[in-house]
Image: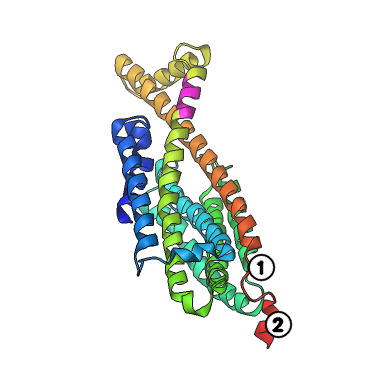
């Protein structure tokens, strides 16, 4: 199982750099497909399989697992991208970025305790619904951020989407396991962990791949719009050169340095736009997770009555 997972992750994460049609990437996809099929054949034919694939005939379990996979994919992708954006685009130090991220971890723990207790008393889909909405909202507003967004606003968005984890994780686990008979809870719990692990790994891989693709797309678009010899770019370059000369740089050095500054500015704009696009995609994935999450239903149809009884 590990072979096809690693091969698939390598293909996804390195596809843009190596070229999707390169022999290396194609070989990784072939290896992943071959070992995945081999894994299925072995699991379906041996007397004591490593995984009980029969659980996937349980439709409620599958639906709840899809919701868990999609949520973990979006959440962990956002975790990776926010930390990267703070240092890459906003040019924050690791310490400054950590200060922005730290309150979210505290909020996640506090909300998790309350959501777990709420899920024991009421239908666990209520905190799940709230958590998915919180994450979708935070992803949407992260998709609207710019280089002038304040640290306070970024901290608030981080707190909101980290709170969503507290709302979703324990109640969704409860829903997943409640779809199974008691004798298969151990295997179901293990599969739930595998689904979430897949979501986390693929979230980072997919997020970084989409980000890289969007950066290239925006660089090409900005390059077409801001050719070096257009009037606006030439005026900006001339003004930058003049300011650098006034600051003490020599003429040739000032000209070269002005070009570097303009190039870095274009790169920053392209990266910011790419992050915006990627967060909006994560918002869509989170909203997509709402459908299987709300359709999930365990053996207990009335959670409130059960807890009161």
Q: Quadrant of residue 60?
A: bottom right
Closer mark to the observer between disc 1 and disc 2: 2
Q: Quadrant of the N terminus?
A: bottom left
Label 1 vs label 2: CA separation?
A: 15 Å
- Residue 267 to residue 291: above or below: above
Q: Which residues are magenta?
A: 217-223
Residue found at the very far bottom of the displayed protein = 309
- Residue 184 to residue 276: above or below: below
Q: Quadrant of the C terminus?
A: bottom right
Q: Is 21 left or right of 278, judged from the image as shown? A: left
In the rendered image, residue 170, in percent from the top left (x then y), is placed at 53, 71
| Model colouring | rainbow
In the rendered image, residue 293, in percent from the top left (x then y), is placed at 61, 61
Tell me if I can see residue 71 in this picture.
yes
Q: Residue at x 45, y 47 (%)?
A: 81
* Front-most of residues 157 and 280: 280
In the picture, the disc for residue 300 is: none
* Front-most of residues 5 and 207: 5
Tell me if I can see residue 83 in this picture.
no
Q: Is 281 left or right of 309, judged from the image as shown? A: left
Number of numbered tags placed on the structure image: 2
Q: Is residue 226 magenta?
A: no
Which secondary structure, mark 1? Answer: helix
Q: Residue at x 32, y 50 (%)?
A: 35
Marks 1/2 in contact by CB < 8 Å: the verdict is no
Q: Which residue is mark 2?
A: 305
In the rendered image, residue 161, in percent from the top left (x then y), is placed at 55, 57
Q: Which residue is mark 1?
A: 126
Which secondary structure, mark 2? Answer: helix
């Amino acid at each position: 199982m590990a072979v096809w997972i690693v091969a698939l992750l390598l293909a996804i994460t390195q596809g843009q750099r190596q070229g999707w049609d390169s022999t290396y990437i194609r070989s990784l996809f072939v290896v992943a497909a071959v070992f995945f099929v081999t894994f299925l054949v072995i699991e379906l034919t041996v007397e004591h399989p490593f995984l009980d694939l029969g659980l996937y005939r349980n439709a409620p379990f599958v639906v709840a697992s899809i919701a868990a996979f999609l949520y973990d994919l979006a959440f962990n992708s956002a975790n990776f991208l926010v930390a990267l954006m703070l240092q890459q685009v906003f040019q924050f130090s690791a310490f400054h970025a950590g200060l922005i991220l730290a309150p979210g971890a505290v909020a996640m723990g506090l909300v998790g305790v309350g959501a777990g207790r709420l899920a024991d008393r009421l239908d666990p889909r209520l905190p799940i619904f709230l958590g998915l909405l919180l994450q979708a909202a935070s992803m949407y507003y992260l998709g609207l951020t710019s280089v002038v967004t304040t640290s306070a606003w970024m901290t608030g968005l981080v707190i909101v989407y980290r709170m969503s984890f507290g709302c979703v994780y324990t109640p969704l686990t409860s829903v997943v396991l409640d779809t199974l008979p008691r004798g298969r809870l151990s295997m179901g719990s293990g599969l739930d962990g595998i689904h979430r692990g897949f979501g986390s790994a693929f979230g980072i891989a997919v997020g970084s791949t989409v980000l890289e693709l969007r950066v290239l797309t925006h660089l090409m678009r900005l390059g077409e719009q801001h050719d070096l010899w257009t009037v606006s770019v030439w005026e900006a370059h001339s003004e930058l050169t003049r300011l650098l000369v006034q600051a003490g740089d020599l003429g040739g050095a000032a000209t070269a340095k002005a070009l570097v500054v303009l190039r870095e500015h274009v790169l920053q704009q392209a990266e910011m736009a790419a992050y915006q696009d990627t967060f909006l995609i994560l918002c869509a994935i989170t909203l997509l997770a709402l459908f299987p999450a709300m359709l999930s239903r365990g053996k207990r149809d009335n959670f409130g009555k059960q807890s009161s009884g």
